[in-house]
Image: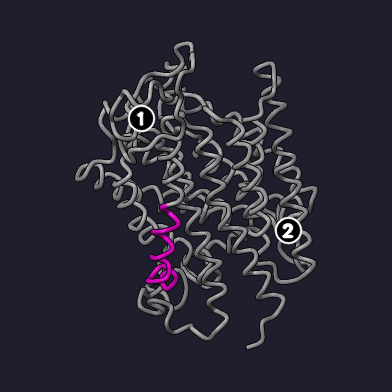
Amino acid sequence: MELTAGHIWVMVASAFVLLMTPGVAFFYGGMTRAKSTLNMMMMSFVAIGIVGVVWVLWGYSMSTGDGVVQLFGNPGNSFGMSNIIGTDSLITAGYGATFAIITVALISGAIADRAKFSAWCVFVPIWVTVVYCPLAFMVWGGGLLGPDGAIGKAVGTAIDFAGGTVVHINAGIAGLILALIIGKRRGFGTDPNHRPHNVPYAMLGAALLWFGWFGFNGGAASSAEQGGLIWINTMVAPAAAMLAWIIVERIRDGRPTSLGAASGVVAGLVAITPACANVSPLGAIAIGILSGIGSCIAIGWKFKLGYDDSLDVVGVHLVSGVIGTLAIGFFALQEKGAGGGLFYGGGFAQLWSQFVACVFSIVFSGVLTFIIGYAIHKTIGFRVSVEDEERGVDLSEHAETAYVFTGVNTGGRFDSHHSLTHKPAQVKESASV
C-alpha cells in the first residue's frame, strides 16, 4: 500500500500527541512542590511505558472491532496487533495509543505529593483496561453511545471529535475519585508551602501541550477544509480562555498571574477538544471564554468542598470538559442543512445528546474508578506514610531529588532532608517547598 500524505499526517500528529505527555510532566512537575517534582514527572513517564504495552497487547482490540454487548471490543481481536501487520490500521492504532497514554497521565495531578508510585503502577494498567478502553469503544468504536448503539439510537449521537468525554471528563472524574479515596495532603488549605515551586516549568508544559494539541485535535481531520477549521479553533479557543482567566484573576484577586495564563490555555484546549471540528471560530471563542471563566472559578471549589485535588485536574479537565461537551449543543454548525446546535436552528436535540453523554461518562468512570482505587487503597495501600510525605515522595519513592541546594542561605524556606544515599552530611539542604 502506498504511503499517502494522509498517512504521514496521522503519524506526525501521533508524535505531537505523544509529546503532550512529557508536556503534562513539566506542567504538573512545576505546579507541585520541589520535593515531589520527579515523582510527578515519573507518573507521566511511566504511563507511556505501561499504557504503550497494554495498548499493543489488548488495549487497541478493546477500543475497536467487534463489540461485546456494545461495551468494549473483543480483547482477542487484534491481540499483539499481529493481524494488522501489513495494513495501514497500524497508523491509526498508534494514534489511538497516544490518547490513552495522556488520559492516564492527566489523572496523576489530582494525587500529587502523597501517592505510592507502586500503587500508581498497579492502577494504570487496570484503569486503562477497565475504564478507558471501554469508554473509547462506546464513543468512537461503534459501541453504546455511537450512532448504532442503544443509547445513541435512543437519545441521538453525541459529538466528541477528539475526547471531551473519553479523555477529559473521564480523567477529571477519575482524579476526583482518587483524591477522595487517598485523602488530603498534610497541611492542605493551611500550609503556605503547598504552592507551585517552578512556574516556568508549568508554562513550558502548557506550551508543549498547546503545540501537541494541534495533532490531538487535527490528527483525525478528513479534509483540508476540516483541518483548517480545527487548526483555527485550536488556536483561538485557548487564546480566549487565557484572556478570560487572567481577567477574572484581575477582577477577583487584583492581578493576573502567569500560572493563571498557563492554566487558562489548558482549560481552553480541553473545552475545544470535543467541538473543534463542529463549531465556527466565533463559537470557539465563546467556548474558550466560558471555559476560562468556569475553570478559574472552579479551582476554588476544592477549598470550599474539602477535597484535595492537588493540581486542579477537576477544576480544569472535568469542568472544561463538561463545558466544551455541552457547548456543542448550542454552537454546533449545521451539516448539509440538517442538525446543528440550539443557536443554529437545531433545537434541543443535540444538547440533550451531549448532556446524556456527559452524565454517562461521569457515572461510568466514577463508579469503576472508585472500585479500582478503593481496592488498591485497601490492599497494597495508595498513600505513602506521614513520614515519607513530609520528607518528600521524590526521596521516599525514587531515592532522588530534583534539586540539590548546598551552601545556600534559604531563609528557612527549605527543610533539611537526606541525600540520595540517605547520608545527611552529603547534602546540607534540599527543597521542601
Locate the N terminus and report the quarter of the image it occupies: bottom right
343 lies above or below 383: below
Name which residue lies at 49% across and 70% down.
149
Q: Is residue 59 magenta?
A: yes
Q: Give the alpha-carbon distance from disc 1 to disc 2, as whole Å.
A: 42 Å
Name which residue lies at 49% across and 83% down.
85
Q: Amino acid at mark 2?
A: Ile
Q: Tag 1's secondary structure? A: loop
Instruction: From the image, tell me which residue sits under label 2.
Output: 230
Instruction: From the image, tell me which residue sits under label 1.
Output: 392
Relative to residue 141, is residue 225 drawn left or right?
Answer: right
Q: Is residue 382 magenta?
A: no
Image x and y of residue 199, in percent? 59, 30
Q: Tag 2's secondary structure? A: helix
Sequence-wise first label, 1 or 2: 2
Is most of the magenta stretch helix, strand or loop?
A: helix
Residue numbers of the magenta segment: 46-62
